[in-house]
Image (cartoon, helix red, strand yellow):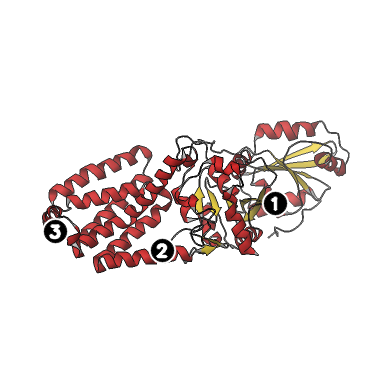
Amino acid sequence: MTDLDEALSADIEITLSKLKELCGDTDDLNVVRVRIGAVECAAVSAEGMVSAAGAGDLIFQPLMYLNACDAHEVADFLWESSLLSTQRSKVATYRELVELMFSGFCIILTDGWDKGVAFGVQGFEKRSVSPPDSEQTVYGPQDSFNETVRNNISLIRRRLKTPLLKVEIIKCAKQSRTDVCIMYMRDRASARMVEQIRRRLKDMGLDTVLSGGYIEPFVDGAYDKSFFPGVTYTQRPDAACLHLNEGRVCILVDGSPFCLVCPGLFSDSFRTMDDMSAKPGYATFIRWLKYFAFILAAALPGLYVALVMYHPEAFALKLLLNLYVSEEATPFPLPVEMTLLVIMFEIMREAGIRLPKAVGGAVSIVGGLIIGDAAVKSGLISVPLLIVVGITATSAFVIPRLDRQITLMRIVFIIAASTAGLFGVSLCCILFTANICAMNDLNVSYLSPLSPLNKSRVGEVFFRRSFKSYAAGRSTVTDLAENGKEGGK
């Protein structure tokens, strides 16, 4: 078996023979043999990865007019005396040959020269830039990342026209050799933070990387220890630029339409790009509304169970009598009833996500109206309980980034409330808060700038300042980067 790190042979027949052996005579390997003057050459590419028109106009047609006597003249024309493509690189080993070939490059091999020249004439099918499916805004930009990493880089570069934006592309995974791009601002991101992320990506040891979820456990240092995510996802180029200006590191994975932002903060889930288009007063109101919705989505079912079972004196007498009548008509205990209803809602939500869009909406209507109405009329579920779960479900949609954590928190709160009442709810709040405060990956606290307290930025968590205040003096959005640098010293 040919070693991938073996150098190419000067004999084109040996090179092509070993290449076919490496690829197992795969049918999508295209080898076009051609004679340029007196020199035997071959154009190697992968089926469907190269643009036929681009290769013909930029490479094959100029080569046909070349009257070469030996391999050195062809090599000089390909590498030094022509501008056949803006993407061009020398190929010295079989590993480079295979990786570039399956990345959409056309490689020209010359008999008598132990190297090849790869030209970027990619022509594989790709999804065009479209409005984002998640993180939708009313007044913000309507473009989003797609599955091609170099297109995603251009969407960010178009917005940040500064030489301080650094782009690093590394190969990850032993088999897939996926392009993973690290982007950061050289004057704002901590050098130690960037080095830690770079080292974690290179030390993954995976065979295949197909999306950002593959690398998240390795990039997030607290992945196995924390309940909350230490990495933020975004589908919006403008949001990625905002994080870059704050001193974060953005990671783009070829084949994934999402950008990973390191480190992620708890407050990231409660701000959107529409906040930047609204007046500070309204944006502040919406931000507070999201914090309130988070509390309702996570703790309301457990709080309802605790009050009804252990603290009925908290209700007014008339309301308490109505609750008593409703619960007496149902066959199940309140905690079991609440848990089953929450699980049924999650089943319908998951079905609505996985099914085709034309059917997903119908599932929500059937689950919400028909099943819910029939369950109440049959006496299986009480009306107040259905109202509580409905408010909880609606509140969870306000914070989509934390929907997975909210789902588990909701069940934990129900179990704790049914066991110990308000004491159990308080204990869960303390444990979740402690878990948030304990997260400190890449020298940045997950609860920053609240803990440790950063007086210059703490207001950004609850309020949206006017852009005039940023223009009047030094922008405070760079303080996070400076804190990371100080932590890395």
Above/below status of 349 relative to 427: above
Can you say which quadrant of the picture contains the C terminus? bottom right
Q: Identify the residue at the far right of this view.
A: 69
Residue occupying the point 29% across, 67% down: 424
- Would residue 173 be seen by someone viewing this image from the given angle? no
Residue 195: give x, y in percent of width and height.
65, 60
Rounded to the nearest whole Å, what is the CA distance between mark 2 and mark 3?
36 Å
Residue type (three-letter) at the residue carrying disc 3: Pro
Name the residue tied to disc 3.
331
Residue visible at 24% across and 62% down in the picture: 306
Residue 88 horizontal side relative to residue 183, left or right: right
- Mark 2: which amino acid? Thr
Q: Quadrant of residue 171?
A: bottom right
Q: Identify the residue shown where x is 34% and y is 65%.
A: 428
Q: Which mark is residue 19?
A: 1
Point 28% across, 64% down: residue: 415
Return the residue at label 2: 433
Residue 191 circle label: none
Crowding around mark 2 (Cα neighbors within 10 Å: few <14, some 14 to 19, many 20+) is few
